């Protein structure tokens, strides 16, 4: 038999009877998820299990596939389409993306499943291009735009030509993100 310990957050709730319960604020609270959501989402999962097979989604797929489907369903919801349960499909794709990211961290899925560009790095680079004074004051080894290796010419980029530089940053990011090459349209 496995010897398990009882986790303790140190936060106690004492009932009128004297009974105590560990009720740490950061414990998951699935009891706060509305039952209607669980029922409707469960129906969406049942339909998917019939169409593909149970746990098919858990076999894994690249993050970009989850996001592409997520965005399609978000747009369908915004447009008011009711041809399928788009809200449940949004929840499903969020779950898939979340599990994919965690699965890669745990080596359950290959790291190639994280096939999206590093948008945080790209956004930082873009902001530094638009505001070179800030970039020069806050050098960052991880950020080539803010590093001293960058020539003054690139730092003095004007608004009218930033699109070309930003396009190059996107291409560089796609080439360098996780060692993958950019997808072809």
Image: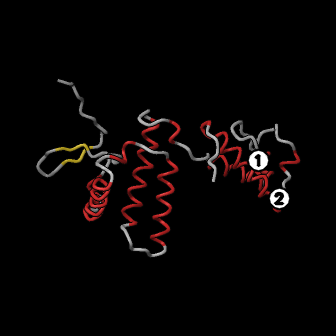
Q: Identify the mark at residue 175; answer none if there is no mark.
A: none
Quarter of the view holding residue 107: top left
The image quadrant where one finds the N terminus is top left
Q: Position of residue 71 (x, y in %)?
A: 50, 61
Question: Mark 1 Cα within 10 Å, few/some/many (few <14, many 20+)?
Answer: many
Q: Secondary structure at mark 1?
A: helix
Q: Which one is closest to the eye, mark 2 or mark 1?
A: 2
- Which comes sooner in the sequence, label 2 or label 1? 1
Locate the C terminus and report the quarter of the image it occupies.
Answer: bottom right
> Residue 141 or 22: which is nearer the viewer?
141
Colour mode of the rendering: secondary structure
User: Whole-percent x and y of residue 125?
Assistant: 71, 48
Where is residue 4 shown, x and y percent of the image? 23, 28
> Which quarter of the picture shows residue 7?
top left
Q: Residue at x 53, y 38 (%)?
A: 112
Q: Are marks 2 and 1 in contact (CB under 8 Å)?
A: no
> Would residue 22 be found to the left or right of residue 69 on screen?
left
Q: What residue is at 86 percent from the left and 52 percent from the top?
A: 156
For image coordinates 81% across by 38% down, the residue present is 148
Left or right side of 103 for 50: left
Query: Label for residue 135?
Result: 1
Side of 172 where 48 appears, left or right = left
Mark 2 = which residue? 161
- Residue that sits furthest to the right in the current view: 153
Q: Regarding mark 2 in the picture, which secondary structure is present there?
A: helix
């Amino acid at each position: 038999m496995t010897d398990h310990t009882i986790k303790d957050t140190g936060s106690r709730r004492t009932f009128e009877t004297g009974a105590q319960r560990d009720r740490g604020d950061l414990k998951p609270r699935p009891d706060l998820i509305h039952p209607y959501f669980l029922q409707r989402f469960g129906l969406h999962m049942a339909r998917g299990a019939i169409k593909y097979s149970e746990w098919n989604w858990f076999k894994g797929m690249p993050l970009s596939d989850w996001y592409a489907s997520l965005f399609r369903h978000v747009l369908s919801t915004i447009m008011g389409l009711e041809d399928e349960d788009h809200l449940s499909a949004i929840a499903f794709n969020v779950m898939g993306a979340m599990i994919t990211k965690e699965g890669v961290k745990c080596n359950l899925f290959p790291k190639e499943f994280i096939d999206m560009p590093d948008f945080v790095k790209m956004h930082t680079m873009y902001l530094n291009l638009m505001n070179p004074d800030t970039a020069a004051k806050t050098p960052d080894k991880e950020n080539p735009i803010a590093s001293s290796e960058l020539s003054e010419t690139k730092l003095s980029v004007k608004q009218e030509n930033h699109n070309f530089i930003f396009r190059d940053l996107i291409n560089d990011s796609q080439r360098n993100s996780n060692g993958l090459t950019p997808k072809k349209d």
